[in-house]
Image (tube, rainbow, N blue to C red):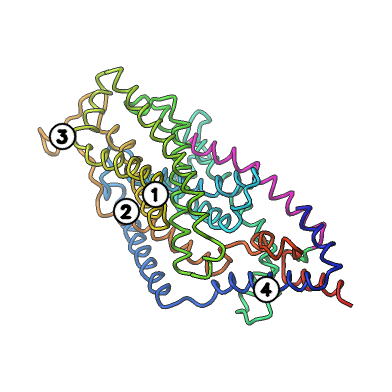
Amino acid sequence: MASQHGGQKAGAGNPQAMSAAVAASRAVEADILSTLGPMSRGQKTCALILGAVCGWGLCAYIHQLRIGLSATAMTDYFSWGVYIINFVFFIGISHAGTLVSAILRVTGAEWRRPITRMAEGITVMALMIGGPMVIVDMGRPDRIWHVLVYGRLSSPILWDLCSVTTYLTGSLIYLYLPMIPDMAILRDHPGYLAPWRRSLYRRLSLGWTGTTDQWKRLHAAIGVMALVIIPVAISVHTVVSWIFSMTLRPGWHSTIFGPYFVVGAIFSGIAALLTAMTVFVTIFPVLHKYITLDHFKKLASLLLAVNLIYIYFTVSEYLTMGYMSESPDRKLMDALFSGPYATQFWLMAIFGLFIPALMLALPVTRTMRGILVASLLINVGMWLKRYVIVVPTLNSPFMPVLNLVHPGQPIHYVPTWVEWSITAGAFAGFCLLYLLFSKVFPIVSMWEVEEDAPAAHAAPAAGSVAGAANLAREALP
């Protein structure tokens, strides 16, 4: 950011330009700070509904704790179900922050500035919801301690626990570092703030004053974390894939699962970010000044590229499996293409992959509404993709399975009300956490937008109103 500090020195000799820079900074901050105001009636209603769904999910989980995993449809044959599907899905959308913020920051894509915090927020909230799904799947929370104490280094589950924990820690640091200048802006805000807010912002600002040395240290720290978080994120979803690919089961034992899962995670992460962007510019119309159709189109182009790569991996996976024609694989393919799981498979393929690709490619549908529809279809399709990865394979064992409860009938996995309730609670919890985060902290990075503002290019501000005002006082007689 040498240009920023150079602009400060140039602006110091031009009082008129400095006044314009201060005014531009104040306008940006006023717009973004308006999103932190009291919740509207619609926002309160949404929060209450989300809270009620979370409460229902918690009641279902307490019921599961009381009677055990018999409350679910999981058995000795279906040892995994929607809990693991949710785990893989949430870990997948957490890659939004890694791609949009870290990779675009490293490559110097300046258009990413208004959307980086949204992406980083998705990462943290998704990990906070997705990580505990493994504990829910265990049935007994105390068993997570056994994984730590008695876990074997040869177990991919232990690797998964370590990688997700590392990823969450790194993502929290990566989310917090760019927030420090904004916390200082809120700390020094002249308007009324609730005492708990003022105290929170003061503690989180870490005594930030916007000096040249502080900016250098901050940019260095953000740069290091951006470089570190990328391989961590890739390793997390690679390890998640190893839980499946290192198991000798039809449809799982594949060497492409590592990159296949990583691409799928980036795919669903970009779609989740586009959905969040649409929601926020709808709730807060003032954000239209900073998050424009151009941002949507650039992310849509990126989403289309990843979509085509994921289609390639999907075709390659099933083409290789079908060409070998081994008995267990053939049984799985029949179940997916024309059997009991054909509905989920073709819904995923048509509505989750091919239709979104067309919508993202055709100019007539590359509108904000069209991109939103494509993103929603992709998110639903990627959840179904995780379903057709987990459940059909467990229903295709190497040895025949006898149904002792209903003799003569095939064994199927149909999630119970407990599993669906906990799933609904998890999604509602993610949305509620994200909503509360956006009402406590600026969802758009103020200092990054100020750096990119047209007025700031003439004479950039110091990254905060207080810093720009001090610089102006030095320049004016």
Region of the chain picked out in magenta, as a range: 211-239
Looking at the rendered structure, which numbered label has been put on residue 64?
2
Looking at the rendered structure, which numbered label has been put on residue 26?
4
Q: Earlier in the sequence, mark 4 or mark 3?
A: 4
Marks 1 and 2 sit apart, C-alpha to C-alpha, by: 9 Å
Q: Are marks 4 and 3 in contact (CB under 8 Å)?
A: no
Q: Earlier in the sequence, mark 1 or mark 4?
A: 4
Residue located 54% across and 76% down the image: 37
Q: Quadrant of the C terminus?
A: bottom right
Q: Is residue 428 left or right of residue 169?
A: left
Q: Amino acid at mark 1?
A: Val
Q: Secondary structure at mark 4?
A: helix
Q: Are marks 2 and 4 in contact (CB under 8 Å)?
A: no
Q: Is residue 93 magenta?
A: no
Residue 54 location, quadrant: bottom left
Q: Amino acid at mark 3?
A: Pro
Q: Are marks 1 and 3 in contact (CB under 8 Å)?
A: no
Q: Amino acid at mark 4?
A: Arg
Instruction: Nearest to the eye among marks 4 and 3: give it.
Output: 4
Q: Is residue 180 left or right of residue 268?
A: right
Q: Earlier in the sequence, mark 2 or mark 4?
A: 4
**Which residue is label 1 attached to?**
136
Q: Are marks 1 and 4 in contact (CB under 8 Å)?
A: no
Q: Position of residue 438 (x, y in %)?
A: 52, 66
Q: Position of residue 95 (x, y in %)?
A: 51, 45
Marks 1 and 4 sit apart, C-alpha to C-alpha, by: 47 Å
Q: Are marks 1 and 2 in contact (CB under 8 Å)?
A: yes
**Which residue is label 3 attached to?**
410
